[in-house]
């Protein structure tokens, strides 16, 4: 009986110790989630957009937000030509 209780207690301690390690994914896990949301064409949160602007989308992502990041519109003013006589 004591062995069973000891084994259960050790098992619970192992599970409790591994829980925070999994939760420490942080920004890398958020970035991967944002990239997968964009790849699936799903809605992007503001946090997802911030991460994708900072680190970029996966290649081949066809969502409009990633297309704008890959091919930004640049407006250049035409240079004035001065006619010399």
Image (cartoon, rainbow, N blue to C red):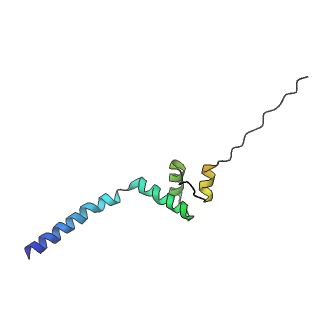
- 53 vs 57, nearest the viewer: 57
Q: Is residue 70 left or right of residue 84?
A: left
Quick one: quadrant of the N terminus? bottom left
Q: Position of residue 56 (x, y in %)?
A: 53, 50
Q: Is residue 15 above or below residue 72?
A: below
Extreme residue toward the left, this view: 2
Image quadrant assignment for residue 19: bottom left
| Quarter of image, res 74 | top right
Viewer-nearest residue: 46 or 37: 37
Residue lying farthest to the top in this orientation: 85
Residue at x 68%, y 47% (from the top left corner): 73
**Horizontal and vertical percent position of residue 58:** 53, 54
- The residue lying at 22 percent from left, 64 percent from top is 14
Q: How many marks?
A: 0
| Position in image of residue 79 (x %, y %) | 78, 33
**Residue 71 x, y percent position in the rendering:** 64, 49
User: Would you say residue 11 is visible in this rendering?
Assistant: yes
Residue sitting at x 53%, y 57%: 46
In this rendering, position of residue 34 left or right of residue 75? left
Q: Residue furthest bottom?
A: 1
In the image, farthest residue toward the right: 85
Q: Residue, x 12% and y 73% (percent of image)?
A: 5
Rendering quarter of residue 80: top right
In which quadrant is the C terminus drawn? top right
Decide if residue 44 is in sight here.
no
């Amino acid at each position: 009986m004591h062995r069973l209780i000891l084994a259960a207690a050790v098992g619970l301690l192992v599970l409790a110790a591994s829980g925070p390690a999994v939760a420490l994914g942080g920004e890398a896990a958020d970035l991967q989630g944002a990239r997968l949301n964009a790849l699936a064409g799903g809605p992007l949160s503001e946090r997802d957009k911030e991460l994708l602007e900072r680190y970029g989308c996966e290649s081949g992502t066809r969502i409009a937000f990633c297309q704008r990041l890959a091919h930004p519109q640049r407006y250049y003013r035409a240079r004035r030509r001065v006619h010399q006589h």
